[in-house]
């Protein structure tokens, strides 16, 4: 992999992180102060808010399309691509699913 691939991967990684953070933040998440509302579970219980995770999922799923294109159609396999994919996917899972599973 050449420097263009690393550079584009790095830029894509940070744009993906920014977009996932942007669309996965709950409406009143800024109310978590550590005293009255200590975590996301307390926030979901105490405040009736709209759950916008389904819209965020629809917006962020296309972030994975470049990986599917490179790995399936172009058949370009490099450890850096796998590392970026695993990191983005783990962060995506945490922001949309895993941090809510501890609430149940």
Image: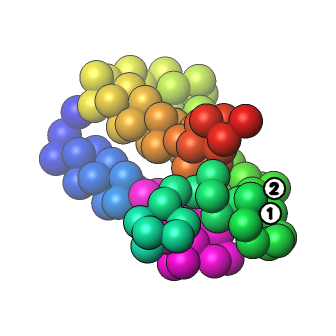
Residue found at the far left of this picture: 3
The reply to whether residue 52 is in sight is no
Using the numbered discs, state the Cα–Cα distance from disc 1 to disc 2 in whole angstroms. 8 Å
Q: Quadrant of the C terminus?
A: top right
Q: Is residue 57 above or below residue 36?
A: above
Residue 79 lies left or right of residue 91; in this view the side is left
Q: Which residues, given as a range, are shown in magenta?
A: 16-32
Occupied quadrant, residue 56: bottom right
Residue occupied by mark 2: 54
Res. 88 mark: none
- Label 2 element class: helix
Q: Position of residue 7 (x, y in %)?
A: 23, 54
Residue nearest the viewer, comparing 31 with 18: 31
List x then y, in percent, for residue 18: 44, 66
Q: Is residue 67 left or right of residue 80?
A: right
- Residue at position x 48%, y 35% from top? 90
User: Which is nearer the eye, 64 or 44?
Assistant: 44
How dense is the environment of label 1, judged by Cα within 10 Å: few (below 14), some, or many (20 and up)? Answer: few
Image: 33 above or below 20: below
Question: Mark 1 = which residue?
Answer: 51
Q: Residue at x 33, y 48 (%)?
A: 9
Q: Secondary structure at mark 1?
A: loop
Query: Alpha-carbon neighbours of circle 2 within 10 Å: few (<14), some, or many (≥20)?
Result: few
């Amino acid at each position: 992999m050449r420097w263009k691939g690393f550079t584009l991967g790095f830029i894509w990684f940070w744009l993906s992180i920014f977009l996932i953070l942007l669309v996965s933040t709950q409406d009143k998440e800024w109310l978590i102060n550590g005293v009255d509302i200590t975590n996301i579970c307390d926030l979901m219980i105490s405040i009736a808010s709209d759950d916008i995770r389904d819209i965020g999922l629809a917006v962020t799923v296309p972030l994975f399309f470049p990986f599917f294109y490179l790995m399936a159609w172009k058949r370009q396999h490099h450890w850096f691509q796998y590392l970026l994919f695993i990191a983005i996917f783990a962060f995506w899972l945490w922001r949309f699913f895993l941090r809510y599973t501890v609430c149940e």
